[in-house]
Image (spheres, rainbow, N blue to C red):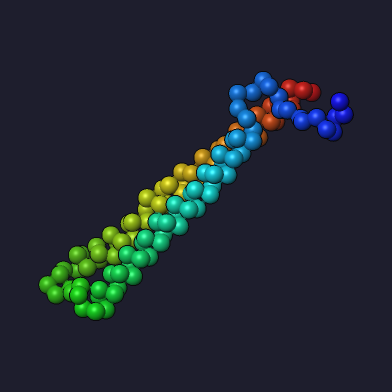
């Protein structure tokens, strides 16, 4: 068989498929951005709804002390924090997978020498 026409298979002494790990890392990166976008969108919608209520006079600050007034915007901004945690976790997992692939590739290359 001609070397160019036969399919090149990877080293069979490994426990994983390199392409599957790369797909998983790519999926983790995309999912991180999607989740961050979703949480940012819901946070901005919540802030917008709050300001519409304030502008129309439905939400009133009559008889509310300063600390309660300050806690209302922080509740809406805190909706974004789970999205940030998911984003950081998934991006870290993506980078760890890529680093482990590089370590495995470098150790295999060093063993051949």
Residue drawn at point x = 29 percent, y = 75 percent: 52
User: In the orientation shown, which residue stands out farthest toward the right?
Assistant: 2
The N terminus: image quadrant? top right
Q: Quadrant of residue 76?
A: bottom left
Q: Where is residue 113 in the image (x, y as percent from the top left)?
A: 79, 23
Q: In this view, does 70 lie above or below 84?
A: below
Decide if residue 19 is on the left or right side of residue 54: right
Nearest the viewer among 111 and 42 is: 42
Residue drawn at point x = 43 percent, y = 47 percent: 86
Residue drawn at point x = 60 percent, y = 27 percent: 16
Residue drawn at point x = 24 percent, y = 62 percent: 71
Q: Where is residue 74 in the image (x, y as percent from the top left)?
A: 29, 61
Q: Quadrant of residue 111?
A: top right
Q: Is residue 58 visible?
A: yes
Nearest the viewer among 100 and 4 is: 4
Nearest the viewer among 92 and 48 is: 48
User: In the orientation shown, which residue stands out farthest toward the top?
Assistant: 13
Q: Position of residue 22 (x, y in %)?
A: 61, 39
Q: Quadrant of residue 39?
A: bottom left
Decide if residue 46 is on the left or right side of residue 85: left
User: In the orientation shown, which residue stands out farthest toward the bottom?
Assistant: 56
Q: Position of residue 88 (x, y in %)?
A: 47, 47
Decide if residue 32 is on the left or right side of residue 12: left
């Amino acid at each position: 068989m001609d070397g160019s026409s036969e399919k090149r298979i990877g080293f069979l002494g490994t426990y994983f498929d390199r392409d599957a790990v790369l797909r998983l890392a790519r999926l983790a990166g995309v999912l991180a951005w999607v989740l961050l976008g979703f949480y940012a969108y819901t946070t901005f919608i919540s802030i917008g709804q709050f300001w519409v209520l304030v502008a129309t006079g439905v939400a009133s600050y009559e008889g509310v002390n300063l600390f309660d007034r300050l806690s209302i915007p922080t509740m809406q901004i805190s909706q974004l924090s789970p999205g940030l945690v998911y984003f950081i976790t998934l991006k870290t997992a993506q980078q760890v997978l890529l680093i482990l692939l590089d370590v495995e590739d470098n150790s295999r290359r060093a063993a051949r020498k």
